[in-house]
Image: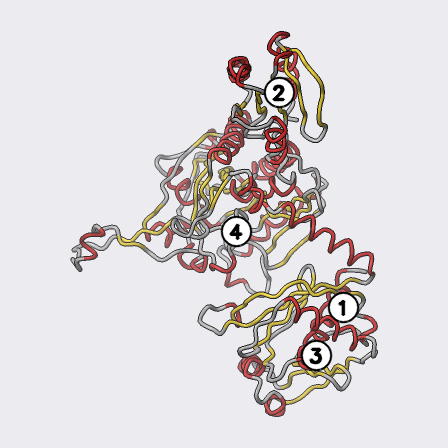
Amino acid sequence: MDKEKLEIMRHSASHLMAAAVSQLYGDVKFAIGPAIEEGFYYDFDLGKKTLNEDDLRKIEEKMNELAKQNLKFGKEELKIADALKKVSGQPYKEELIKDLEKEGEKKVSFYKLGDVFEDLCIGPHVKSTKEIGHFKLLRVSGAYWRGSEKNKMLQRIYGTAFATQKELDEYLNKLVEAEKRDHRKIGKEQELFLIDPTVGMGLPMFQPKGALLWRIMEDFWYQEHLKNGYQLVRSPHIGSRKLWETSGHWGFFSQNMYPTMEVGRTLEEAKAGKKTDVKEEYILKPMNCPFHVTIYKVRPRSYRELPLRWAECGTVYRYEKAGELSGLTRVRGFTQDDAHIICSKNQVKSELIRVVDFITFILGTFGFKEYNVYLSLRDPKGKTKYAGNDEGWDFTQKVLEEVAIEKKLNYKKEEGEAAFYGPKLDFKIKDAIGREWQCSTLQFDFNLPERFEMRFINDKGQEEQPYMLHRALFGSFERFIGVLIEHYAGALPLWLSPIQVRIINIGAAHEKYCQEVYEKLLQKGIRAELDLLNETVGNKIRKAEKEKIPYTLIAGDKEVVAKTVAVRKRGEGDKGPQDLEKFIEMVTKEITERK
């Protein structure tokens, strides 16, 4: 079934669910019930009633009962006044109709589901309930009306629907697998990271093993950037209000930014109510780019210096509602693996191609072979939301698409998804169970060069405005680590594993030899860990397996005498005794080959 038909089927399923709720519970206030990417939902105001798992089962049973009646969907159009009478006592529907009236609508449409339910809806829907297919209710959660914390909390029921039972079963199995791979659960089990409300929600802290994983990734990142002709820069975590006004973020990006902070007085002075003669306002940075532009402008530039490729692992801060935060994948403070390429117009295409090649190399190295690319364009009907002029947008959108075609990327156009400062190519990687994750991005910017009056002297001795490319390969370290954990279900490749080898002694008499093995591994650059606790060998092995350690070495009397180690490999079990030097050689080769 194609995407459009599936969306119509799921939207119809949300109406079927609302009909079931209306028959099971009295005095229900209905909000909205759209189709979403992997299913549908509907928001209800049930007064003091709180839905639970038993309720979901009852609602689903009622849905099946109604679906078997082959109820027909029918459309009716009403004038605004008549529509308001029809929804009397339904405050959320009344609000929606009044908003439509303000937008100039004279009529609104309703859809009837047989004689059991009627709902304000633009449609379309399937012809009857027998076309809805196979559905399953998944969970219930809280949701503020219209997403605003100032409004009432409603109850949102999520469900999904597919054309066949087989597709539904496959999706439900994927959900089970996704739960096993949840990076929040694995991160806790392996002691990689934590988020503590005392520190602040959406502000992850990395424990020793997680911090080591970060360092491995960051070292690789720096190494590859230096090999690819990038220079490193660094910028502060805050910038003056004037900086963000000049960049355009103050006007175009404020919904993602935190309020200003006053830095002209101390906390002590503020608590005492002391005023300042000069007001200094700063903002937590949502992006790194204005700082890089400022560095560029420190002196005159020549065309002979271009392109400049400046990279930074810079932590930025963006506003997220508390209810939308999720582990490492949706946070308030995150570190972008950022870079900005400043170049002339005739260098744009070759630099874009160079970045695309860099992105695909990085993704492939970390085990992501499949990805979809989305070409995000300006909404031609909403130009006021964007900076820049038509000429700049036409050129940048055209050249980005040319690059996507030349590099044979599997891309899809998305109007209205461009950043306010320019179009972009977003790479959404597919993990081991087929889920898409937004990570790498390549963005065009002709806004900042204009706003900051960036110039270089061209080969004719004249001033010329450069172009600027934004790009991130991981997207952010936090999100990419979360995706990595879920992709590999916590069993990271040897080269990425914070602990590559765990060494276990059988008894106290073998501790000294285990210590010698440990020291040798460290000297060879292998990340090793000793487990000399007074526990059974079986228990130690089970711990290593649970923690997804790639190799476990066991030493007893035989190994001490022969100077060998008993090797266990993750996922393969006992590999028998091996000479220590040969084991080191084998592991070193695997690490070098990034296995």
Q: CA distance from mark 3 to mark 2?
A: 62 Å
- Tell me: 563 left or right of 338: right
Is 474 positioned to the left or the right of 315 in the image? right
Horizontal and vertical percent for residue 473? 56, 39
- 69 relative to 559, above or below: below
Nearer the N terminus, badge 1 or badge 2? 1
- Residue linked to disc 4: 330
Which residue does the numbered mark 2 point to in the structure image? 554
Query: Mark 1: which secondary structure?
Result: helix
Element class at badge 4: loop
Q: Earlier in the sequence, mark 3 or mark 1?
A: 1
Residue 333's label in the rendered image is none
Which is more N-terminal, label 4 or label 1? 1
Q: Residues within 10 Å of mark 2 (few under 14, many from 20)?
A: many
Checking the image for residue 19, the label placed there is 3
| Mark closest to the chain's N terminus, 3 or 2 | 3
Closer mark to the observer between disc 3 and disc 1: 3
Which residue in the structure is indicated by mark 1? 9
Quick one: label 1, few (<14), some, or many (20+) residues within 10 Å? many
Residue 425 percent location from the top left of the image: 61, 47
The quarter of the picture where residue 255 lies is: bottom left
Which part of the image, by quadrant, shows the N terminus?
Answer: bottom right
Q: CA distance from mark 3 to mark 4?
A: 34 Å
Measured Cα–Cα span from mark 1 to mark 2: 57 Å
Q: Residue 578: where, in percent of width, then height?
A: 68, 14
Residue 555 can be seen, yes or no: yes
Q: Quadrant of residue 168?
A: bottom right
